Image: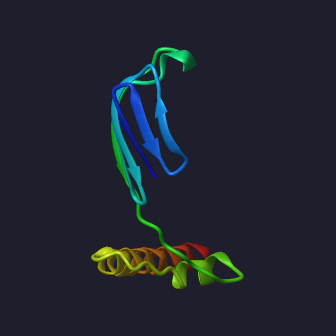
Amino acid sequence: WEINFPFLSICSEGIFFRPQLKFEIRIPYVHFEAGINDVRDGLRLALKGELYVVATASGHSVWELHDNIHCDTIGFSQALSAAKATLSTTATAGNVAISKMAG
């Protein structure tokens, strides 16, 4: 984790004074940054925000991986189920179309 303020950086490794003019928060699954980074690393202006979601899967083939994707984030399971249904329907329709073309 890390939190930056103008001229001050507080992180899991300690507190540091840095020649910077930025506000930043970096915690699990969230990253927000606005301002000018440490000028010793070059001049960089940033304004960004990111959210992360972690999903896991296990299997010995791509199909097994797709079938075994799991995530504990609220709402992700429903979105994943909808995506899987859409993809399986599209894949089935594609297989039928290819079968008709082949023969």
- If the image is split into quadrants, where does the C terminus sit? bottom right
Which residue: 55% across, 47% down? 13
Question: Residue 30: x percent and y percent?
Answer: 37, 54
Camera-side residue of 26 and 10 = 10
Question: Residue 42: x percent and y percent?
Answer: 53, 15
**Image color mode:** rainbow
Camera-side residue of 39 and 82 = 39
Residue 34 visible in the shown view = no
Q: Image height check: is 20 above or below 30?
A: above
Q: Is residue 13 left or right of residue 51?
A: right
Residue 27 visible in the shown view = yes
* Image quadrant assignment for residue 3: top left
Question: Residue 2: x percent and y percent?
Answer: 44, 46
* Image quadrant assignment for residue 51: bottom left
Which residue: 55% across, 16% down? 40
Which residue: 54% across, 76% down? 56
Which residue: 43% across, 60% down? 28
